[in-house]
Image (cartoon, helix red, strand yellow):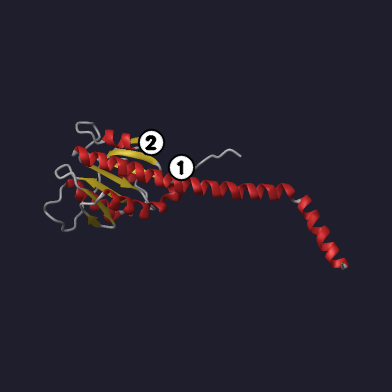
Amino acid sequence: RTLLETVFQYGAIAALVVFQPELRSALARLGRSKMVRIFQRLEVGRVAEEVLEAVIRLSGLGHGAIIAIQQDIGLDEYAETGSFVDARVSADILTTIFTPHSPLHDGAVLISGNQIHSAGAILPLTQSQVDHSLGTRHRAAIGLSEETDAIVIIVSEETAQIAVAIEGHLEQDLSADRLREVLLGRLPTLDTALQPVELQA
């Protein structure tokens, strides 16, 4: 063994001893960051399934609904036109909000991350030429999707059909499987919008 090899070996050991607290802290941060990302991915999936379950229920009941899911562009200016809710996304709450004669059922629900941010919100109607058969909810959904990158889901009160507006385009008569595909294809961009997660060390 050469002198140089010996110096490197003992130098590495000494460095590990000297910098042990910093190394432990760095490894802990790395593990924590990974756990947070895993949690966020799981939470994105949960949000998608809760929204999907609510939409299926509302369609089955024939209750109209409009649900906008924020992506990168904030929806605060629209949220201010409704009532702040600040509740974790759940199918039960969404279904209750859109029950006929409830005070908030006529407006839109705005979701930010894993929270229902606002309900009863007023959205801008599209100024584009659209099918004359489309009602106010569909026009509002298209309007918001033209101004922001939100995913806007509509349940028709007249036909019970499910539709989604994204980037000014309306896709109608979606099946549950198709809506799930759309949500899971778009929602991963919500990772940064999810509420901060505090994990035990």
Q: Is residue 2 left or right of residue 157?
A: right
SS at mark 1? loop
Classed neighbour count for the residue bearing mark 1: other residues with Cα under 10 Å, few (<14), some (14–19), many (≥20): few
- Residue 97 image offset from top left, x and y in percent: 27, 34
Residue for point 88% across, 66% down: 3
Where the N terminus falls, by quadrant? bottom right
Viewer-closest of 173 and 101: 173
Which quadrant holds residue 120? Answer: top left
- Among numbered discs 2 and 1, the one appearing first in the sequence: 2
Q: Is residue 108 visible?
A: no
- Residue 24 image offset from top left, x and y in percent: 69, 47
Q: Is residue 49 left or right of residue 11?
A: left
- Residue 191 image offset from top left, x and y in percent: 45, 50
Residue for point 81% across, 54% down: 14
Q: Is residue 159 visible?
A: yes
Indicate the amino acid at tag 1: Gln
Classed neighbour count for the residue bearing mark 2: other residues with Cα under 10 Å, few (<14), some (14–19), many (≥20): some
SS at mark 2? strand
Where the C terminus falls, by quadrant? top right
In the image, residue 167 above or below residue 94:
below
Indicate the amino acid at tag 2: Asp
As drawn, the label of residue 83 is none
Marks 2 and 1, how far apart at CA: 11 Å
As drawn, the label of residue 195 is 1
Q: Which residue is mark 2?
A: 86
Residue for point 43% across, 47% down: 193
Q: Is residue 182 left or right of residue 190?
A: left
Which residue reaches farthest left? 132
Which residue reaches farthest front? 177
Viewer-closest of 182 and 110: 182
Which quadrant holds residue 83? Answer: top left
Residue for point 32% across, 45% down: 77
